[in-house]
Image: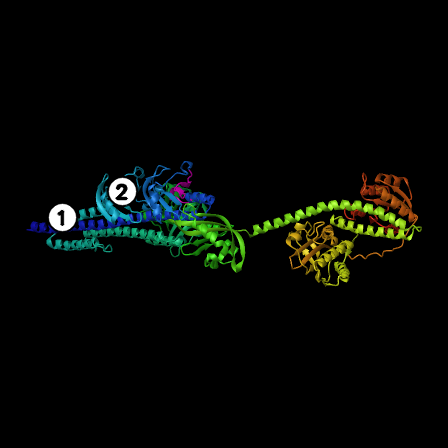
Amino acid sequence: MLNQLLLLLFLPTLIIVVITFVSIVLVWQGTLARQQVKLSRSIANTVVTYTDSAKRVLDALGQSIETADRPHLKQFLTDTQSAYSYFDTLYILDLDGRLDLMTPLDHQYIGLDLTRQPYYAKARQQKSTFVSAPFISMRSGKPTVYLAKSVESGRMVVGELNLSTLQANINAAIGGDRENLVFVADRAGSLLAHSNSQLVVEQHSVGHMEIVRQGLETESTKVYRTSTGWVFGAGVPIESLDWVVISQQSLKSALGPLVRVVAPALSLSFLLWLWVLWTLRLQQIKRVVAPVGRLAETAQRIAAGNLDEQARLEEGKEIGELAASFNHMTQQLRNHINAENMIADISRRLMGTDSDSLDDEINRSLSEIGRFVSADRSYLFLISKDGRTVSNTHEWCADGIVHFVDSLQNLPTENYPWLIKNAAQGNDIVIPNVAAFEQASTGEKAEWMRQGIQSLICAPILTRGSLKGWVGFDAVKQQRDWSGEGAKVLHLAGEIFYIAMQRKWSQTALKASEARYRQIVQHAPAGICEFDLQHKRFIGVNDVMCAYTGYSQTEFLALNPQTLLPEHHLPRWVQQHKDLTPDNPTLPPEEHRIMGKNGRLFWALINCRFVFEDDTPVRLTAVVHDLTALRQAEAEKKQLEAKLAQIQKLESLGTLAGGIAHDFNNLLMGIQGNASLMLLDENRNSNDSERLNGIETFVQRGVELTRQLLGLARGGKYEVKPTDPNHLVNESATMFGRTKKEIRVHQKYQAGIWRIECDRGQIHQVMLNIFVNAWQAMPTGGEIYISTANTTLHEATVKPHGVPPGRYVKITIADSGNGMAPGTMKKIFDPFFTTKERQRGTGLGLASAYGIIKNHGGIIDVDSQLGEGSTFTIYLPAVDKDVAEDPVVKSRLRGGSETILLVDDEPMILDVGQNMLETLGYRVLAVQSGDEAVDTYRQKTGIDLVVLDMIMPDMGGAETFAQLKRIDPDVRVLLSSGYSIDGQANEILNQGCIGFIQKPFSIQEMSSKIRDILNQ
């Protein structure tokens, strides 16, 4: 009876054990399915992030094609390929689909026609970036995926996706999980990424797998057999790429934890129940059956997904241990799922966070995982690109724990020799007791002790076998051991953090690159604007274009383009625009007048390029160069060339005129001297006196003519004195006004006018020449306006005239006459040019005025228009000297008995001069050369004065004077010349010559000059 009862109880017990096992397996299967799907989703997010980042880089490169010139574009292409690891190769195709630029550069492919590539036509058809099926790269021979982007100008940018880097990112996302195998395939079943990279290289196909076909359509899980055995797999589609991500795990490794936890428990339970059933009585059996029933109910609730359920701990050792094991298994499962959910949530948040907020999000994530494992401190260390320094970039500390992040920046990697060596080998750094740990270097341990660390764990961050940093936990309050779930959390978090930081660095570099090229456009040395042809509005403008036109950016973008181009320019521009095609999108550079703000017109060189969609131009980019400065420079250059040519012409004519005046003065001297001597003859009759006076009159007219010739020749000033310009101009104006009553003269003189140094007679001559010119331009009378002013001329003003900058006195003479045509005004200072009748002018008046002013170091200019009168402006250099008074001229002859040495190479001058001097009572020694003069002066004593000609053959006046000074430093010399006092004569006077007399001179002038010198 008892055996039957035990048998009846055994069968329900066995059923309960089986139900419990099945329930646990079902729970485990559901958990495993969710785990595998989450892993596939995480990898899918990694793939999408990688390809989206690559697309953004390609889009930025496409935008640069529109704005950058070829050298900048070539550099940008190289910088992009080296800065980002998304692409093995980057191409830029021209409008014909031929390879124009590439990096890395391979000259054999330049110019290659790529229009037959499968991606070319499809990329032309869509606006977004086209992703091709896998191909073998023509350059590297490796499998790749082409990303192609057609830009608005008709060109195309193409990138060969780096599948090795994609695989590395997938490996980083998997972390240290070696149980899962992950691969990515396209709809055709071609492998794009696989843990076994050789299968990708061999283009192994997985299209026959049912999990691949199902995963392309929807998220799927399946148990299936592979060449390595039974596996549990999950497929997740990537709809934007038409790819699928498969993650699979062998059933052996998947069920391992379940077997290790459940099998011992069930076996123990089964044995216990056998022992109980055979040894206990019915009452005891009843007390055991009830807890087992409750355990079965708990298992069913856990199978339904309620992981917070726990088995009740019953009395009795065996049942209690079974419940405790069950609860421990459930807690491990719960922790594992929570960790995965946390990591998946962190990954999702980091992928969705922009680069500006990424640091805060990483710190938040460190806080989350630190609290999850009950750490006191969690942190991220990253090694610099050159591998020389390491920095604590992010840190979280629990309440009451000291932060050290600020003091752990840019530390030499030599500070962590043991940690870096082991981390670089892929080993986790687990130190349960820092104080007792002896393997680390003394510096490492000292640093950990300084931070109060009792226990630590670090997981390395490795990319392509290279250590990039580590992420870790510290225990400060008490010792901890995180070698289990904590290590796995660190591995997953570290890879996710580094991928996020890579994305930040890429986005930062991309933004910097975009900002650099925007800066180039914004501050290019030319105006740049963009115009939307479809909506008839400006869509972009740089600061230079705004400066050209005077508009602000807001005002410019609101402009109608017809506002900028004058009406007569529009028809030609519109006609040229109609002739453009996608193959010929650029207008030839042309000069146009642009109308700026407030009606300002300026010339500009415009380069236009049109962007076409199909055969329709949709956008225009214009590059504008302001030609105002160039046009002004060209005009100034022409003016300077014209002035220089006129100056050179006047200089040549002046040299000729000076020589003629000198010889003519010598002739006049002979005539004047003989006439003066004959007039002194008391035996002459009255008729002879009239004729001799007439001769003297004609000589004076000849002297006036030679004075004008010497003025034209800039032959100089005869007698230079500090002068009040107001007094001088007023004296000339008053003298002119008395003779021309029909002309009203208006005078305005500046008080405190600066002094000038001039030959007063010559400046009178200049004034009278200008007054006469004005009078002849007003046959029926008119007005003359005279003014003076102090002024300072700068380098830009005086440079064309060849005079130094500084203080000048400005004299302005304006008339209300007929004015002059431009052709007349150009020749106004030419010698012998006149618009008057033959008997009214010689054409030397204004020419001599020009020469005189130039010889005084000044400027004379004229401005005139027909019907509006003429204005002459004179600038004479100012001096800081007191005004010199004119001496009183005595008219009677003043003779003497002194000895005079007369030196002249002209026999006629020598003869008449000797007669004049002897008539005045002087003893005369006459010689014809400088050599004779020096010899005579050396041999003779008692010579009181030397009258020395300046221009003589062989030894000239200057050298003769120098020789005489060496013989007698006190020698008195009167210089005589047909030239003026300027130039060589002035140099002799500065060396100690006592006086100067201009040929031709009368006996009265000679007597007065000699007597004044001898009386000194």
| Label 2 crowd (10 A; few <14 / some 14-19 / many >=20) | many
- In-image side of 883 versus 119 (left or right): right
Image spot of residue 424 (x, y percent): 38, 41
Q: Is residue 399 above or below residue 147?
A: below
Quarter of the rendering containing residue 941: top right
Image spot of residue 435 (x, y percent): 39, 47
Image spot of residue 804 (x, y percent): 69, 51
Would residue 774 be counted in the magenta stretch? no
Q: Which residue is mark 1?
A: 274
Q: Amino acid at mark 2?
A: Gly
Quarter of the rendering containing residue 291: bottom left
The mark nearer the N terminus, 2 or 1, is 2
Tell me which segment is drawn in magenta: 83-105
Residue at 9% x, 50% y is: 6
| Label 1 crowd (10 A; few <14 / some 14-19 / many >=20) | some
Q: Which residue is mark 2?
A: 189
- In-image side of 891 versus 560 (left or right): right
